[in-house]
Image (cartoon, grey):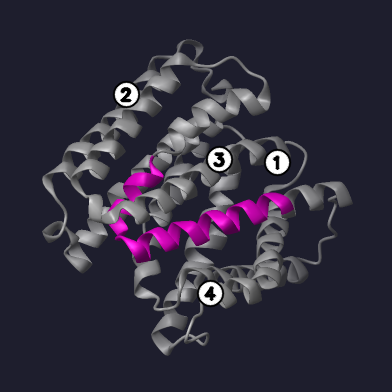
């Protein structure tokens, strides 16, 4: 269990860099995610071929993994759209609402009983986001898009936790990212028709950051995330990912000095979100019998 939590928090730490990388890369959100997935897929398939392993996944499993990969791709596109419309800090704070969405969706999708404490902790996060929304109305559209991204992200680990019980994490990751890449490739002409992008070829610096994003934050981070899901619940994973804003916002403050452009309300809301993370951590430690794997 300790190993699973370590894997999870390394993945969260790597995820904290993705917001900053999204702003460093000058491509629009759709093209950015397309390149991210392309790089990750090439690396994953090369590793698979070099190892000389045979895929044990069935056709049904591959279809399920690819479908979940489409959901992941849409989450990333809306996440980076939120960053480019508003800023890194606001988009990352909104992403913290995953815990609330998961507390509602996981019992519905898995036919489990609702956990009142999880719902209350999720509502605490929502309260924090509403404070940010109230004090920073100029980021309204960015907040809405970021909340859509959080909703999509909350479904992702619920479906994944079911799939990886019968499918190896490496195989699941490979087919999910491939499914997302294939979907975005098909959708790209339509997307660019309605939202034109003047430049499709990355600059030299764009390529550098895309490789960091595609290999370090995606291939390595995603693999750690998938392995942690084998032991930890979707809600706990999502709530732990609320630490992602801490890393991302700290970097945004240091690199882009976003602390000079946000209102005091941002800090009030952010404190409520951190309180939810701390309370859930305390709750996990107090659970008797050490049965964290059942959470």
Q: Are marks 2 and 4 in contact (CB under 8 Å)?
A: no
Q: Nearer the observer, disc 1 or disc 4?
A: 4
Location of mark 2 (residue): 279
Mark 3–mark 1 Cα distance, whole angstroms, equals 11 Å
Work out which residue is located at the far top of the displayed protein and give it: 288
Q: At numbered mark 3, what does the secondary structure look like: helix, strand or loop? A: helix
**Quadrant housing residue 252:** bottom left
Point out the tag, 2 or 4, that comes first from the N-terminus.
4
Location of mark 4 (residue): 31
Count residues near mark 2 (Cα–Cα under 10 Å), then give few for <14, some for 14-19, many for 20+.
few
The x and y percentages for residue 39 are 59, 73
Location of mark 1 (residue): 164
Q: Nearer the observer, disc 4 or disc 3?
A: 4
103, 204: nearer the viewer: 103
Q: Is residue 119 magenta?
A: no
Q: At numbered mark 4, what does the secondary structure look like: helix, strand or loop? A: helix
Q: Are marks 3 and 1 in contact (CB under 8 Å)?
A: no
In magenta, the rendered stretch is 67-96
Q: Are marks 4 and 3 in contact (CB under 8 Å)?
A: no
Task: Tell me, yes or no, if residue 55 can be seen here.
Answer: yes
The x and y percentages for residue 79 are 45, 57
The quadrant in which the C terminus is found is top right
Q: Is residue 88 magenta?
A: yes
Point out the tag, 3 or 1, that comes first from the N-terminus.
1
**Residue occupying image coordinates x 19% and y 60%:** 253
**Quadrant housing residue 128:** top left
Q: At numbered mark 1, what does the secondary structure look like: helix, strand or loop? A: loop
Task: Tell me, yes or no, if residue 1 can be seen here.
Answer: no
**Residue occupying image coordinates x 85% and y 60%:** 54
The disc placed on residue 228 is 3
């Amino acid at each position: 269990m300790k190993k699973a939590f370590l894997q999870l928090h390394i993945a969260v730490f790597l995820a904290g860099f993705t917001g900053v990388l999204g702003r460093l890369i000058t491509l629009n959100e759709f093209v950015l995610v397309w390149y991210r997935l392309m790089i990750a897929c090439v690396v994953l398939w090369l590793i698979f071929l070099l190892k000389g392993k045979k895929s044990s996944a069935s056709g049904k499993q591959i279809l399920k993994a690819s479908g979940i990969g489409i959901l992941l791709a849409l989450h990333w596109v809306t996440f980076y759209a939120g960053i480019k419309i508003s800023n890194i800090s606001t988009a990352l704070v909104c992403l913290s609402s995953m815990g609330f969405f998961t507390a509602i969706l996981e019992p519905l999708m898995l036919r489990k009983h609702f956990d009142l404490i999880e719902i209350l902790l999720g509502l605490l996060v929502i309260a924090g986001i509403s404070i940010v929304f109230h004090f920073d109305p100029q980021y309204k559209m960015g907040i809405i898009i970021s909340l859509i991204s959080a909703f999509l992200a909350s479904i992702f680990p619920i479906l994944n936790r079911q799939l990886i019980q019968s499918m190896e994490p490496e195989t699941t990751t490979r087919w999910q990212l491939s499914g997302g890449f294939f979907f975005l490739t098909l959708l790209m002409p339509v997307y660019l028709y309605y939202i034109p992008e003047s430049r499709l070829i990355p600059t030299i610096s764009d390529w550098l950051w895309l490789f960091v994003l595609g290999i370090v934050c995606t291939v390595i981070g995603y693999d750690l995330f998938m392995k942690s899901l084998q032991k930890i619940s979707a809600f706990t994973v999502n709530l732990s990912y609320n630490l992602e804003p801490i890393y991302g916002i700290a970097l945004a403050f240091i690199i882009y000095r976003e602390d000079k452009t946000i209102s005091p309300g941002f800090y009030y809301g952010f404190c409520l979100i951190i309180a939810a993370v701390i309370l859930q951590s305390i709750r996990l430690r107090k659970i008797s019998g050490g049965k964290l794997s059942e959470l």
